[in-house]
Amino acid sequence: MRRASVRAIITADTVGGVWQYSLELARGLARLEVETVLAVMGPSPSDAQLKDARKVPGLTLIDTGLELDWLARDGGALEQAASRVARIARESEADLVQLNTPALAGLAAFDRPVVAVQHSCVASWWEAVHGSALPEDFAWRTDLVRDGLHRADIVVAPTAAFAAVTRRIYDLPEAPHAVHNGRTPLPLPSRPPHDFVFTAGRLWDQGKNLETLDAAAERIGVPVQAAGPVRGPNGAEAMFDHLHCLGTLDEAEIGRWLAARPVFVSAALYEPFGLAVLEAAAAGCPLILSDIPTFRELWDGAAMFVDPRDEAGFTAALGRIVGDDFERATMGRAARERAARYTPDAMAAQMATIYRSLLPAIRRPVLAAARHGGQAAA
């Protein structure tokens, strides 16, 4: 069988949005003749996740069983993970490595180009949620991330706003490249609109600020449905008085909820991108979002914004939009139109351009960054 023009090793995990990001990127890259080897760290993929991965052309999945950076007991565990990923890259004859765990870049000798993608980090999370000095358990992790980011050939972040935060925290000589995430719209069954509020994500994560929504839910008069796990792999657990917790849902189940075009809300204190918001927007749901820089960058002009710690503000905004069919429809159209910018093909085209910049000139012509309309990117 003919080898694809380029082969990339991509690290991923199954806990958060990096899993969905990695599959979407692999799909987009496959259309650009890039093979991907997905090295999964942390908990093993579920049966549903494995099924989704098998649908991606040219994707090879390796379940490494290695520890995630934010769950690792010590630096030794991460050094072991880095060495294993470097070995996988050699054995797979990969042309380059994309580390969605940037700390690994400084812990092993990668004898090929390294792209580090900074999806999130404990230092920026702690700053947004607590605003105080890092605890000792976070400090050493942050040092490893700093070293990895400085060792990588190119650093990427999902928004310009988060790129700026990353540059400041880790003293980078320049801001990372901003490449917006892309998401394939979920399939939606035919369903009439219903009056309820919907949110989704890691409900156990303090950065999602579900306490504010829980308090607002008591006063708005319609159900607030919350999809996602309430218990995290780090032992964190959340309990709510007024949110209707739905548990972890697969794509088809989320699609059924979004098909009713509920008001989608996120009161996040910390969100470097927010794939759940993009899924809701693509479904035509009106958006009420916390007024943080990343959401402003992505959704300004297509959403309503509220200070993330303003419980009364969320209560008022939700009450206003839920009861106004015209406003809901208008905001839903604006969200859907904006969501059309953030596609897997757009994301893959930009990442392919970055890959190409790191490869020897002899291999570059085959890695066209985009072929829409029969034209390849220069």
Image (spheres, rainbow, N blue to C red):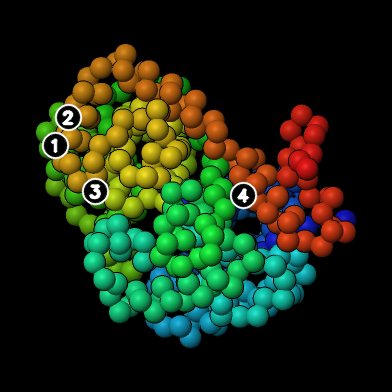
User: Is there a contact, CB below 8 Å, between mark 4 and mark 2?
Assistant: no
Q: Quickly name the residue at label 2.
A: 316
Residue at 37% from the left image edge and 18% from the top image edge: 329
Question: Would you place residue 41 above or below residue 361 in this image?
Answer: below
Q: Quickly name the residue at label 3.
A: 210
Residue at 73% from the left image edge and 61% from the top image edge: 358
Q: Earlier in the sequence, mark 4 or mark 3?
A: 4
Q: Is residue 210 left or right of residue 375?
A: left
Q: Is residue 84 left or right of residue 67?
A: right
Front residue of 220 and 48: 220
Q: Earlier in the sequence, mark 2 or mark 3?
A: 3
Question: Would you place residue 243 above or below residue 49 in this image?
Answer: above
> What amino acid type should be assigned to the residue bearing mark 1?
Ala
- Image location of residue 340, percent across then percent down: 54, 30
> What amino acid type should be assigned to the residue bearing mark 3?
Leu
Q: Label 2 vs label 3: CA separation?
A: 17 Å
Q: Quickly name the residue at label 1.
A: 312
- Image location of residue 121, percent across then percent down: 41, 63
Residue at 48% from the left image edge and 72% from the top image edge: 146
View extreme (bottom): residue: 76
Residue at 54% from the left image edge and 49% from the top image edge: 178
Question: Would you place residue 259 above or below residue 224 in this image?
Answer: above
